[in-house]
Amino acid sequence: IADTWDKGYGHFTTRQNIQFNWPKLPDVPAILSALADVEMHAIQTSGNCVRNVTADHFAGAAADEIEDPRPYAELLRQWSTDHPEFQFLPRKFKIAITGSPNDRAVTAAHDIGLRMARQNGEPGFEVIVGGGLGRTPFIGHKVRDFLPVADLLPYVESVLSVYNTLGRRDNKYKARIKITVHEIGVAAITRMIEERFAEIKPLFGGHDQALLDDIRAAFAEPAYRDAPVDAYDAFYKGDPVFRAWADTNLAQHRNPQYAIVTISVKAHGQTPGDATSDQMRVMADLAERYGHDDLRISHEQNVILAHVHKSDLPTVHAALAQVGLATANVGLLSDIIACPGMDYCALATARSIPVAQEIATHFEALKLEHDIGPLKIKISGCINACGHHHVGHIGILGLDRAGVENYQITLGGDHTETAAIGDKTGPGFAYDEIVPAIERILRTYLAARLHAEETFLDTYRRVGFAPFKLALYGDEGGRDAA
């Protein structure tokens, strides 16, 4: 598709999708047909409906997982696709699910967030409602401590039904469920959800559970190989480049002979989330040869090989390195989330991609990235917040101020199980001021941290906003946010 109808590129998004930025409108039917040939689609990727259901990108592989959430995500997808009651909601609706206590799915920033839990040994969900970013960011509210698995579909339908009835249709900027929850109150909307749930639960009659059993079979574990891992151990000890990559880009798999590989598409100076058609072919080939035919997109705009035997990792690393996909930076400063911004998006008010590129290359030149350690920088080119800037450790929002790009900084955001909206620092910065401003923030962190293992977010939570504000604005302390 990228070669035939685009310009040889695809862009991985925070919705765990792939986006093509150059197709001509008359070619769209052919693209959709080509996608359908391989069981892919673009259904409900826009409109006031339930959008694609997202899940932890390590699902079914992570060592810290309570249960694989993918069957439940697929159940929700099938239920929500062309659901006659929910095709004209007050506004779009997003659902995320994680099977791990370590939230990699940004559940608290979704309209519904589902976190798997266990009660008396039985699996279920903690249910969060009313999260969202955009122009009015909110962290979602817990409405159920524990929802049994069997009640998932009727409960989610109850949430949608209440929202469809109460959500505002007079103002699209106040139409999301987060505003409904804020205006009505958590207690009131929880009561209404529970009342609706009591009404509709008997109507399901167990049919959803029969479907879930069929779906589970499609998500069975792959046939793991039992083989020595000596090759991995030897490369790890003897090759410093491989070791650096393994330390940053591998995650612990539930099978100790395997690893989860995060393929960084964030080489220093490259467009975050962009991959060439040749790079995509290499990743697909590696998935077929070494990854049990499994390839995923993360909300952090990287690509995941979820099941790779450790003995194959040196070969996988070498193949990735040949096409510029072996940068050892996952979770570090240059692993930046950035929306397409003004370069591609008609809604954008400022550029995102060049800011991300300049930050990455600047700190690569300073050789500070690994010293700084874990850091989430997230950039949005407008208030719609597709770059998740509100929940970045450092968030950057590009705005238009009288025809001039202006970048507002937030600090202390968090997308995990300890989710938080970042604090606005004050007036925004011009395009040529934003990289120096980020450097001042990070040098303040390096000076303030107690030791090398204290992360930026931990340091910010300990010392507070004041030293960073001083570094950014000096004694003037920052005026009202621009």
Image (cartoon, rainbow, N blue to C red):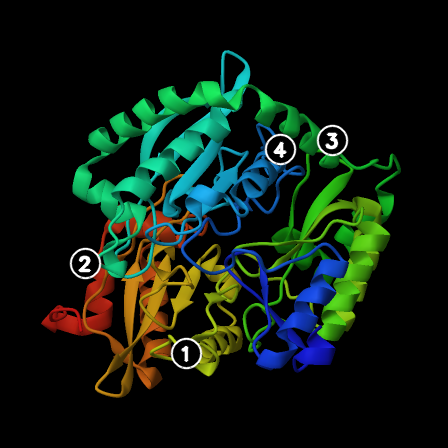
Amino acid type indicated by mark 1: Ala
Q: Position of residue 377 (x, y in %)?
A: 42, 63
Answer with mark 1 or mark 4, whichever residue precedes in sequence: 4
Marks 1 and 4 in Cβ contact (< 8 Å): no
**Residue topped by disc 4:** 68
Marks 3 and 1 in Cβ contact (< 8 Å): no
Amino acid type indicated by mark 4: Asp
**Residue topped by disc 3:** 217
Name the residue at 72% across, 54% down.
Answer: 39
Q: Position of residue 73 (x, y in %)?
A: 57, 39
Answer with mark 3 or mark 4, whichever residue precedes in sequence: 4
Pair 3/4: label in front: 3
**Secondary structure beneath label 3:** helix
Q: Please name whichever residue, 397 or 402, is drawn nearer the observer in this view of the structure.
A: 402
Q: Please name whichever residue, 293 or 251, is drawn nearer the observer in this view of the structure.
A: 293
Residue 49's mark? none
**Secondary structure beneath label 1:** loop
Name the residue at 62% across, 80% down.
Answer: 26
Badge 1 crowding class, 10 Å Cα cut-off, few under 14, some 14 to 19, many 20 or more, is few
Answer with mark 2 or mark 3, whichever residue precedes in sequence: 3
Badge 3 crowding class, 10 Å Cα cut-off, few under 14, some 14 to 19, many 20 or more, is few
**Residue topped by disc 1:** 346
Q: Would you say residue 210 is visible in this rendering? A: yes
Residue lying at the far top of the rendered structure: 120
Pair 2/3: label in front: 3
Q: Position of residue 297 (x, y in %)?
A: 61, 56
Answer with mark 3 or mark 1, whichever residue precedes in sequence: 3
**Secondary structure beneath label 4:** loop
